[in-house]
Amino acid sequence: MIKIDLNPKRKKKAIPLKKIQIPALKLPEIGKNSFLIVIVGGISFILMEFAYLFYLSNRISSLQEKKIQIGSEISKLKEYEKKLKEIEKLVSSLEQQKEKLLLKIKTFEYVSQYKKPLTPKLNLLVQSLPDGVWLENIELAFAEAKVKGNSLNPENISVYYKNLNAFYNIISFNGTEKKVSPINNIYYSFEFNLKGFKQK
């Protein structure tokens, strides 16, 4: 007996699927201890960063305080420098005054030392004056003298010249000058330069 299938749809045969096996990657297992180490390490790093930042902050504040202190010391040093300059000026002024005082002391010592020898010479110049002659100025040294004076009569000047000639070797005399006083009196001025005092 022959069977004829009149159904046009044919059943397809199922193709069996092949299974492909993918090799599984095994990651290393992280144990509890490893996880704790990672966490502790991270926290330690953060703490170190905070500690470093805290150190830097303290360092900066310390340097700022030192800067303020240095500025204060610099201002004090400037004040000291100003005062030092004032003291130096004062010392310089005192030294000049000291030099002047020393010069005066030496002058006084010099005058006091030779006061006695000069006094007789002064007496000689005054005592040798004839009547009608008066002196305006006397400059006296040990061996020299300068005398300026006036006289109503020129002959009295020549008498004074002769009197001084007994005490001095050289007498320079430039002559007399005729003058008129405010009350119309006529008088004569003269000047003697005396040198070479004759020791007695």
Image (cartoon, helix red, strand yellow):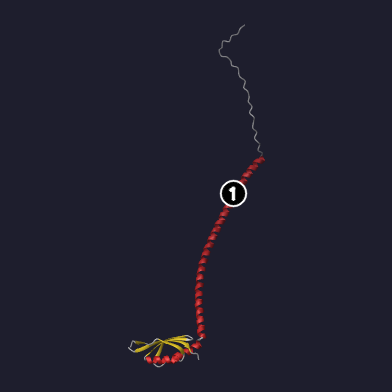
Front one among 93 and 22: 93
For badge 1, the amino acid type reads Phe
Quadrant of residue 181 in the image?
bottom left
Residue with the most extreme bottom position: 131
Q: Is mark 1 on a helix, strand or loop?
A: helix
State how many labels appear: 1
Residue found 65% across the figure and 43% down from its top: 37
Residue with the most extreme left position: 184
How far from the left and from the top, in percent, is residue 65? 55, 58
How far from the left and from the top, in percent, is residue 53? 58, 50
Residue of label 1: 50
Residue found 53% across the figure and 64% down from its top: 77
Residue with the most extreme top position: 1
**Lateral position of residue 96 relative to residue 39, left or right:** left
Front one among 114 and 8: 114
Asked if 20 appears above or below 119 in the picture, the reply is above
Quadrant of residue 171 in the image?
bottom left
Residue found 54% across the figure and 60% down from its top: 70
Front one among 3 and 134: 134
**Lateral position of residue 172 relative to residue 14, left or right:** left
**Lateral position of residue 21 relative to residue 107, left or right:** right
